[in-house]
Image (spheres, rainbow, N blue to C red):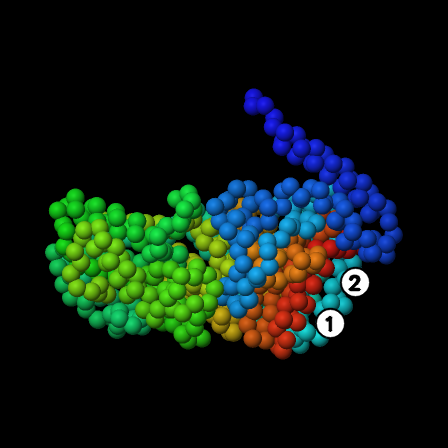
């Protein structure tokens, strides 16, 4: 057995000290009168848990747990930008250490008796704390809330929890659960190059500039034709791979070009024509909000989300014809590898029995869900909604995806009264979900009975640290590092739904929704205060 290093001895000593301090603080907390507990709440939590997280905060502060996606954890924790589909300002503050408690997913708060063994909060106790906060004038006239206990599996506090409201980007929670339910967390999306010999057929895609429209015949693609077939991978990239394990990298057009060039040369083919097939998706590709820096036209073939700058998430100018741009980039990669591509890439439809030449596959669906939720990525959200439709045998359009998402959630017996899924990203104001549905989605994702949904929780931004919450929760906020939540922001709409471990070590999920707001920053702060209150509460 290897000799124990001095750092290990120090670590074990710190752990023993933390446990002793936690046990003492917990006994003191429970013996105190209720009013005294309220006064001591933040101090008690800090004393009980500060030592426990001092050495481990960095390891768990990101939205990835148990070694998952470690190559991206450091980048996420140090990321200054929280921009996603929502307009959040980038933070210029230095990276902060996690305050009092950031318990591991599915675990208990340090010093606590475990999420199931800790005292169950009561509705009256939560109402005493949350009801006054829900009266904040910064919130709009519609204010709904739902808080559920994970171990008990039931709602312990609700205000108009069944009333549908505009969710904004929190609808991505529904899309994530639907996609994982329909496809499984290990599913990967393929982008393929096939032999285009013979009549190419008709493009099944209309509406993108430069692509075949109205089912126009693309003609004979020739003896040495190949077709790039988009499968709908929204994270496909044409950029040079970043350092790090290959298993953590998205599918790359460069890799696909290398494999394709090698296969063509083995066949003695060095000159080809190139077509591209986007028929996996149907219906209009433009989101109802129109051309917008928050989202690209929805195509089964795109690279780097059709961004015209070097950004990876957040708002950016977009190419109006993502498939054309991706095909041209692929053609350029083939030329660099000794393959002559005659003419410009043309819209095509792969023959039904086309032979496969090369294929690249996306990261697992669980990883796509994490990225979507952390950065509120609208392009991934629309892609996953359509993947859900494909799995269900429905048209991969806005309408078909909405039906497929609803059906997948209905199969899980979730409360869908009044729910409308007009899109997958939450940019459409016609979307409707209830706070009760959001909290139920999170309840299922936290449950040990549904490990396939775990990435819904691990992908949630961490307050004050990652994703769309990196610029929220100031340094001294008790919610920083303790709240994991998905944000939702449109003009006049603010939502927040996530999970916390309360002061007694009980895991809770929550959803707060408001509409008709006129002070966006004030509304965000009010929602953050509500979430922090749940984290601080030992509400009995």
Residue at x 65% of width, y 56% of height: 480
Could you say which is closer to the camera, residue 131 or residue 177? 131
The quarter in which the N terminus is drawn is top right
| Residue 222 seen in this snapshot | yes
Could you say which is closer to the camera, residue 434 or residue 427? 427
The quarter in which the C terminus is drawn is bottom right
Residue 128's label in the rendered image is 2
Q: Is residue 51 placed above or below 321 in the rendered structure?
A: above
Residue at x 60% of width, y 49% of height: 61
- Occupied quadrant, residue 3: top right
Residue reaching furthest to the right: 33
For the residues bearing labels 2 and 1, Cβ distance under 8 angstroms: no
Could you say whether the residue bearing mark 1 is in a helix, strand or loop?
A: loop
Could you say whether the residue bearing mark 2 is in a helix, strand or loop?
A: helix
Dot 1 corresponds to which residue? 135
Instruction: Compute the Cα span from label 2 to label 1.
Output: 12 Å
Residue 104's label in the rendered image is none
- Occupied quadrant, residue 475: bottom right
Q: Earlier in the sequence, mark 2 or mark 1?
A: 2
- Is 509 on the left or on the right of 38, as rendered? left
User: Residue 23: where, in percent of width, then height?
Assistant: 78, 40
User: Residue 66: where, in percent of width, then height?
Assistant: 55, 42
């Amino acid at each position: 057995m290897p000799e124990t290093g001095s750092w290990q001895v120090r670590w074990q000593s710190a752990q023993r000290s933390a446990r002793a301090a936690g046990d003492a603080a917990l006994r003191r907390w429970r013996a105190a009168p209720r009013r005294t507990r309220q006064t001591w709440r933040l101090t008690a939590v800090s004393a009980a848990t500060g030592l426990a997280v001092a050495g481990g905060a960095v390891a768990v502060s990101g939205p990835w747990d148990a070694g998952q996606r470690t190559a991206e954890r450091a980048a996420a924790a140090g990321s200054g930008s929280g921009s996603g589909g929502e307009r959040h300002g980038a933070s210029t503050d230095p990276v902060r250490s996690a305050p009092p408690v950031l318990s591991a997913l599915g675990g208990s708060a340090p010093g606590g008796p475990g999420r199931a063994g800790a005292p169950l909060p009561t509705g009256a106790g939560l109402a005493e704390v949350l009801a006054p906060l829900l009266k904040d004038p910064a919130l709009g006239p519609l204010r709904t809330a739902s808080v559920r206990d994970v171990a008990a599996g039931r709602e312990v506090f609700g205000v108009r929890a069944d009333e549908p409201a505009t969710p904004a980007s929190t609808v991505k929670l529904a899309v994530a659960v639907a996609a994982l339910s329909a496809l499984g967390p290990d599913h990967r999306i393929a982008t393929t190059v096939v032999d285009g010999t013979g009549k190419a057929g008709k493009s099944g895609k209309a509406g993108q500039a430069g692509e075949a429209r109205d089912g126009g015949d693309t003609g004979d693609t020739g003896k040495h034709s190949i077709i790039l077939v988009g499968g709908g991978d929204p994270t496909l990239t044409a950029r040079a791979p970043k350092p790090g394990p290959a298993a953590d990298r998205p599918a790359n057009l460069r890799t696909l070009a290398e494999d394709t060039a090698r296969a063509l040369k083995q066949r003695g083919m060095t000159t080809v024509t190139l077509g591209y097939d986007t028929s996996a998706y149907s219906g209009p590709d433009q989101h109802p909000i129109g051309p917008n820096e928050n989202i690209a036209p929805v195509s089964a073939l795109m690279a780097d989300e059709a961004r015209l700058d070097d950004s990876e998430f957040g708002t950016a100018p977009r190419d109006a014809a993502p498939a054309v741009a991706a095909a041209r980039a692929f053609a350029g990669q083939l030329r660099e590898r000794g393959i002559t591509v005659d003419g410009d890439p043309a819209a095509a439809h792969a023959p039904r029995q086309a032979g496969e030449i090369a294929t690249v596959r996306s990261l697992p669906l669980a990883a796509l869900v994490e990225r979507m939720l952390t950065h509120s990525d609208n392009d991934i959200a629309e892609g996953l909604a359509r993947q859900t439709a494909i799995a269900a045998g429905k048209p991969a359009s806005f309408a078909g995806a909405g039906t497929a998402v609803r059906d997948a959630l209905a199969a899980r017996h979730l409360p869908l009264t009044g729910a409308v899924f007009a899109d997958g990203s939450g940019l459409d104001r016609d979307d409707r979900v209830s706070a009760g549905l959001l909290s139920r989605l999170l309840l299922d994702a936290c449950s040990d009975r549904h490990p396939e949904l775990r990435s819904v929780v691990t992908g949630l931004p961490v307050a004050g640290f990652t994703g769309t919450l990196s610029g929220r929760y100031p340094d001294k906020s008790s919610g920083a590092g303790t709240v994991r939540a998905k944000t939702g922001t449109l003009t006049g709409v603010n939502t927040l739904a996530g999970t916390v471990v309360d002061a007694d070590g009980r895991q809770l999920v929550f959803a707060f929704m408001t509409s008709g707001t006129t002070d966006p920053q004030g509304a965000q702060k009010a929602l953050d205060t509500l979430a922090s209150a749940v984290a601080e509460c030992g509400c009995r």
